[in-house]
Image (cartoon, rainbow, N blue to C red):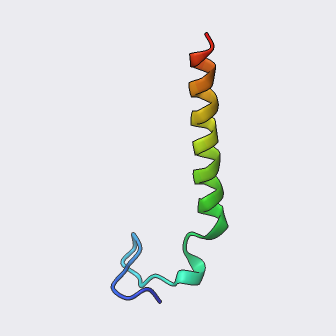
Amino acid sequence: MVQGMVDYKGCRVSRSKSGSWRSASFIICEFFSKLIFFFGLLNC
């Protein structure tokens, strides 16, 4: 358990069930999509 943290339903948060690779992969993909978009605009 993460002390003092609750989810959007008000339940206590378990570190093993929150975040993990699912959210990490979303953040990494979002970063690279912004990077590709930026260089695509830069080369126009």
Q: Position of residue 10 (x, y in %)?
A: 36, 78
Query: What residue is rendered at 41% in x and 74% in y?
Result: 7
Q: Image check: 6 left or right of 14?
A: left
Number of numbered discs present? 0
Residue 9 placement: quadrant: bottom left
Which residue is found at the position 61% from the left and 10% from the top?
Answer: 44
Residue at the limit of the structure toward the top, as seen here: 44
Residue 38 position by quadrant: top right
Location of residue 22 in the rendering, given as x and y in whole percent from the top left corner: 65, 63
As displayed, is residue 11 above or below residue 21? below
Q: Residue at x 63, y 40 (%)?
A: 32
Q: Relative to 19, does residue 42 appear above or below in the rendering? A: above
42 to the left or right of 8? right
Residue placed at 58% from the left, 43% from the top? 31
Quadrant assignment, res 42:
top right
- Please tell me which residue lies in front, 33 or 16: 33
